[in-house]
Every structure is written in C-alpha cells, then in structure tokens.
Image (tube, rainbow, N blue to C red):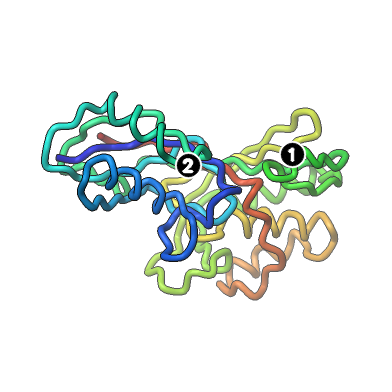
Amino acid sequence: MKYLINLSYNGNHFYGYQIQKKELTVEGEIERCLSKILNISINTIASSRTDRYVHALDQYCTFEYEKPINTKKLIKSLNSIVDDNIYIKKIKKVNDSFNVRYDVKKKTYIYKINIGMYNPIDKDYVYQYCKKIDKNVLNTFIAKISGEHNFKSFTSDNDNSNYIRDIKISYRISKNILYLKFESSGFLRYMIRNIVGLLIDINNGKKELEDIDDIFKNQNRTLLGMCAPGNGLYLEKIEFNKD
C-alpha cells in the first residue's frame, strides 16, 4: 500500500531535503520517525528535493507499507516525535500507480527579497538585498526569462538529459518585500536561485539585460554571477495530475 504525506518545514534547520549520512535533513528525519513508529525500515520518495535553507509550505512524499494504517493516528504520532521544524499536515492512502514525482502537474515557488531597510528579524526568511529594484528592469527581465528555454546555464547539474523548461514568472510588492513567483512542471537544481542572482547582478550593473540572450544561447553556468541565498526561497505549492 502506498501513502502520501503532505508536510511543511523550516529549511534553516536542515542540510537540505535529501538524506545525508552525517547531516540532519528533512528526508532523513521523516524516515527515522516513520521507521520508529512502524517498527520497520521505511524509505520515502519526495516530489522535490529542496536545497539547504530552502523552506517548504507544501512538500509531498510517499512511502509504502504492507498493512492498512490509521492515518490520523500516524499524523499525531509523527508530529509528536519529529523535529519541531517539520510539521506533518496530512497523510492519505493513494493508488499504487501514483508517482509523487512524475504525476506533478505544477510546482510553485516563491522567492522573497527585502528591497527596504535591513531587517535582522527576517534575515533567515527573506533575502536582505535592501536596495530598490528598477521596475522597468524587473518587467523586462521577467519577459525575457519566462517561457520555454534551455536553462542549462542556470544549473550546476551536468548529468541531466533535458534542460528545457517552460516557466511562468510573476511578482508583487508589499511593504518593501518583492515576492517573485515561479511556476513550472519542474525545475533544475539551483535554477530559481540562479535566476534571482542574475536579476540582482543586472540591477547592480554587473550584468546587462542584453546578456540574457547570450546566457541562454551559450548554455554555460560560468556566464552567471551570484546564486541567491536559499533562505529566501519557498516551495509554496505542488499540484498533481492525479493522486
């Protein structure tokens, strides 16, 4: 039987999502607690492997167990022993054919940038850029980056067989926080953070908007500059074709 877990977590306290032998990770903590409660070694598969410091409001993972589970009881048990920077929101049984990775219809990420005065309280949750971003630059940048492109220049992953992604970017500004929204069926490793880093470099005058075309064309990560910090990034929502 296959079960789907819906969870959220504060990424500042973990060494990323994916399990590592000597580091505290979200996946490692979930598997440790499931294995303890169910008294059997449990492996999970996640929809998205977020980087170190990246937060999630709507992450999903699946695991298999041969017996029927009282999911309400399991939620309560997990939340009682799991690291308190993780919260299990929901667990339900799904069809055995459901694939938590390949049945994803859309992922939505939010990147938060402080464009006002430095805020030490929010420094672990909002990138403290603390400079205004020209709206003309922002609008042109989004128009150039949005759509279907080869994003090989925006990832350090050299083993991927397909770097083509179709993304939609939008934004809003509220109380000196710029909220950048990224929507796609899938993203490459560091892709969003590298996109945000390029925006910052352009706003700082280190790159030009005209450079974007060459960056796409040359498919070379070395053409980019900074990679924006992980703590401003949130996995906001995952939508499935079925479950």
Residue 139 appears in the rendering = no
| Residue drawn at (61%, 46%) of the image | 233
Of residue 236 and residue 140, the one placed in the foreground of this image is 236
Q: Quadrant of residue 19?
A: bottom left
Image quadrant in which the N terminus is located: top left
| Residue 72 horizontal/vertical position (percent) | 29, 24
Cα distance, mark 1 to mark 2? 22 Å
* Residue furthest top as drawn: 72
Q: Which residue is mark 2?
A: 83
User: Mark 2: which amino acid?
Assistant: Asp
Judge left or right: residue 23 versus residue 36. Answer: right
Name the amino acid, label 1. Asp
Q: Quadrant of residue 171?
A: top right
Question: Residue 210: which numbered mark, if any?
Answer: none
Residue 130: percent from left, percent from top: 84, 45
What residue is pinned by disc 1? 122
Q: Front-most of 222 and 41?
A: 41
Q: Secondary structure at mark 1?
A: loop
User: Quick one: 152 or 37, which is closer to the camera?
Assistant: 37
The residue drawn where x is 67% and y is 55% is: 229
